[in-house]
Image (cartoon, rainbow, N blue to C red):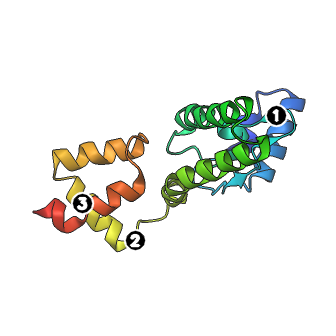
Amino acid sequence: MTTGLDGGLKGLGGRVACRVRVVVRLLGGGGVGRGIGVVARVPYGPGWALVGDAGYLKDFITAQGIQEAFRDAELCAQALDQTFAGRRTFDTAMQEYQERRDSQVMPMYEFTAQLAALDPPPPEMQQLLAAVSRSRPAMDGFARLTAGVTSPSEFFSEASPERLLA
């Protein structure tokens, strides 16, 4: 019996299996917990713009892709509106789009990278998660965090273990 990646690819055609192996190798092993890392691209150029995963890639463990794609599309549309209305040059508006995108994605990227490592959480996080497990409002807050509704910086600044234990 073949296990691991080769076992999973056994039923695929040769060309597809070969492509999957190349992608896995490029991503450093691929898959949840293997630390895809962040691949950030300049999201614009003459006649084109990127949103969501096309502009940057991170581990999929927090399932933020479609939400971030919609957010990026809105930011990009605002930048293009500035350009088409003559209020800013394309490069200036799109540079601002990139800066806004990057500042909004980094807190969730850092949280995602920590989760994706699948390492035991540091003691502070273990304490926080234990406190969250004993409080319905804290559980709801943590669910909003993992759903991308609340930013990690907002959740962790408000959700100190002392407050949750009170």
- Residue 160, percent from left and from top: 25, 65
Distance from Cα at disc 2 to Cα at disc 3: 12 Å
Q: Is residue 131 left or right of 85 when viewed as pictured?
A: left
- Height in image: 22 above or below 118? above
Q: Nearer the viewer, mark 3 or mark 1?
A: 1
Secondary element at tag 1? strand
* Residue at 76% in and 27% down: 11
For mark 1, does the 10 Å Cα neighbourhood hold few (<14), some (14 to 19), or many (20 or more) residues? few
Along the line of sight, the residue nearer the viewer: 129 or 164: 164
Secondary element at tag 2? loop
* Residue at 52% in and 34% down: 67
| Residue lying furthest right | 15
Along the line of sight, the residue nearer the viewer: 110 or 115: 110
The quadrant of the rendering that contains the N terminus is top right
Distance from Cα at disc 2 to Cα at disc 1: 42 Å
**Can see residue 1?**
no
Instruction: Please name the residue that numbered disc 3 is placed on.
Output: 130
- Disc 2 marks a residue whose amino acid type is Pro
* Residue at 87% in and 38% down: 46
Instruction: Please name the residue that numbered disc 2 is placed on.
Output: 122
Of the image marks 2 and 1, the number of the one nearer the N terminus: 1
- Residue 128, percent from left and from top: 27, 63
- Residue 145, percent from left and from top: 37, 47
